[in-house]
Amino acid sequence: MRRKIIAGNWKMNKTLSEGLALASEVVNIAQDEVPSGVSLVLCTPAIHLSQVAAILKSADRVFLGAQNMSEHESGAYTGDISADMIKSVGAGYVILGHSERREYHHETNAQLAARVKLALNKGLTPIFCCGESLATREAGEHVGFVNNQLKESLYELSAEEMSKVVIAYEPIWAIGTGVTASSDQAQEMHQSIRASLAGQFGEQVAGQVSILYGGSMKPDNAAELLAQPDVDGGLIGGASLKARDFIQIAKSY
Ligand SMILES: O=C(CO)COP(=O)(O)O
């Protein structure tokens, strides 16, 4: 059975006090309302992690994640955050290769391959993001494009390593735009990602990897997306900034 995961990517939002209030509200509501098979992950700004960790200690199904990580273990990389640092504050997840990082910070598939490997070596669960631009989709090249992102960043891993990775498919044209992929478009891509994983790592591993959908997922469209057989959860941006909306999405399962 694959894990069902609803992850919130807060991006660069919330001051510390606002973030702590949001985390507390999520924990309080989740306790009673989130279905037992669903895990929540809060990917907060790095500067909030250690204090949010203290709030999540009492919650059994709400986990903590960072939004980015260096491919270097330590050293003279001003402003960067290492895997050991993320672990040391109590986070177990890290988003890698978000399209905003790829675009504004020029992260490459090769660099992301090194980060995924290092995160796994350090015992962190990478949430590896992939997804195409509108131009790539309109050219009919979206399936090949995403497959190439997987190939260049994940396909040097062992099968055992791969089974520990979470993938998030986030079509760039759906992020923060209010335009969601239709459930058919999401299912088509998720199925193709799983088929590609099966070709590389075997059916068993492909069947274990949770593939999340991200891009304008909201309380009113989550149920249909989450009902697709290859959609195993969501990576939520805007709607994760309101505890009620975030929990409502998790309850749509
Ligand atoms: O980028 C996303 C999550 O990582 C999605 O953002 P939105 O939910 O705001 O579209």
Image (spheres, rainbow, N blue to C red):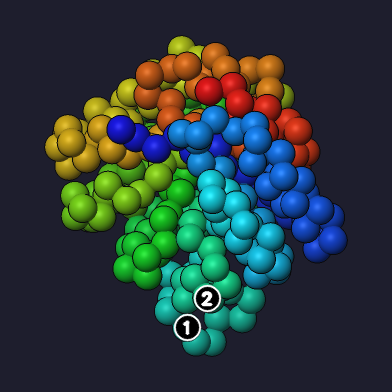
User: Measuring 27% from the left and 49% from the top, which residue is drawn there?
Assistant: 162
| Residue furthest to the bottom | 76
Instruction: Report whether 204 appears left or right of 190.
Output: left
Q: Residues within 10 Å of mark 1 (few under 14, many from 20)?
A: few
User: Measuring 73% from the left and 31% from the top, which residue is drawn there?
Assistant: 245
Instruction: Report whether 10 appears left or right of 186.
Output: right
Above or below — where is 220 with respect to 114?
above
Disc 1 versus disc 2: nearer the observer: 2
* Residue 193 in sight from this viewpoint: yes
Mark 2 and mark 1 in contact (Cβ < 8 Å)?
no
User: Measuring 77% from the left and 38% from the top, which residue is drawn there?
Assistant: 242
Q: Give the residue pinned by disc 1.
A: 74
Secondary structure found at label 1:
loop
Q: Give the residue pinned by disc 2.
A: 88
As shown in the figure, which amino acid type bears the numbered disc 1? Ser
State the image coordinates of residue 241 (x, y, percent, origin top left).
75, 42
State the image coordinates of residue 124 (x, y, percent, origin top left).
42, 62
State the image coordinates of residue 164 (x, y, percent, origin top left).
32, 51
Instruction: Report whether 58 appears left or right of 93.
Output: right
The N terminus, quarter of image: top left
As shown in the figure, which amino acid type bears the numbered disc 2? Ser
Q: Earlier in the sequence, mark 1 or mark 2?
A: 1
Above or below — where is 123 with respect to 64?
below
